[in-house]
Image: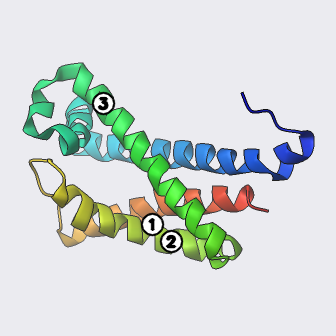
């Protein structure tokens, strides 16, 4: 097991891990909470929403998998949040603007994540549905991606990069 000195804990390698850990956990939690709220407001089932996430990997069979595929949906959701955090973190090591301007970069990153998820990743997945592209849905989902994903990731990465 790797150990860290006090100075490393404050500024070294462990800060890298904490940026990724906390960024992924916060973004994943905020985004999943927003999905639960939107699902509840639409009268939907939270288990079915989570199975919808798992359907990106399993296809329509996800909806007959019960609690197991709902749990897989949670795992996949947080995996994706950690991947987005790692991508931002690695980019911030090369592009200092991402650290110097976390609000602007967080807003922009939220939009980029939305565009890639809704127009590339989900369409290429096994999900048996299309993401909504109505003006209301786009506005809501871009807002959620900015507030729940882009800004938290950018702010957490900045916090552990200084």
Residue carrying label 3: 72
Horizontally, residue 44 falls left or right of residue 100, namely left
In the rendered image, which quarter contains the N terminus? Answer: top right
Q: Please identify the quarter of the rendering in which residue 130 is found.
A: bottom left
Position of 33 compared to 90: left or right? left
Q: Residue shown at 15%/24% (left/top)? A: 65
Residue 33 screen position, x and y as percent:
42, 42
Q: Nearer the viewer, mark 3 or mark 2?
A: 3
Q: Earlier in the sequence, mark 3 or mark 2?
A: 3
Residue on which the image places disc 2: 107
Residue for point 59% across, 60% down: 89
**Colour scheme employed for the rendering of this structure:** rainbow
From the image, which quarter does the C terminus lie in? bottom right
Name the residue located 31 percent from the left edge and 66 percent from the top edge.
116
Q: Which residue is mark 1?
A: 110
- Say whether marks 3 and 1 touch (CB < 8 Å): no
Residue 98 can be seen in this image: no
The answer to which of 143 and 58 lies nearer the viewer is 58
Any mark on residue 2, and which? none
Residue sitting nearer the eye, 9 or 47: 9
Residue 57: image x %, image y %? 21, 41
Q: Are marks 1 and 2 in contact (CB under 8 Å)?
A: yes
Of marks 3 and 1, which one's residue comes earlier in the chain?
3
Q: Secondary structure at mark 3?
A: helix
For label 2, the crowd category at 10 Å Cα-Cα, with few meaning under 14, some 14 to 19 and many 20 or more, is many
User: Mark 3: few, some, or many residues within 10 Å (few <14, many ≥20)?
Assistant: many
């Amino acid at each position: 097991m790797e150990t860290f000195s006090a100075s490393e804990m404050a500024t070294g390698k462990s800060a890298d891990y904490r940026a990724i850990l906390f960024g992924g956990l916060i973004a994943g939690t905020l985004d999943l909470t927003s999905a639960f709220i939107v699902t509840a407001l639409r009268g939907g089932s939270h288990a079915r929403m989570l199975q919808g996430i798992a359907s990106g990997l399993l296809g329509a069979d996800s909806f007959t998998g019960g609690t197991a595929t709902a749990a897989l949906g949670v795992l996949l959701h947080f995996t994706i949040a950690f991947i987005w955090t790692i991508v931002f973190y690695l980019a911030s090591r090369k592009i200092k603007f991402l650290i110097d301007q976390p609000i602007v970069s967080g807003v922009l990153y939220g939009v980029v994540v939305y565009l890639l998820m809704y127009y590339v990743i989900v369409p290429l997945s096994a999900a048996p549905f299309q993401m909504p592209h109505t003006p209301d849905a786009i506005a809501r989902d871009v807002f959620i991606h900015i507030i729940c994903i882009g800004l938290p990731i950018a702010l957490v990465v900045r916090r552990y990069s200084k």
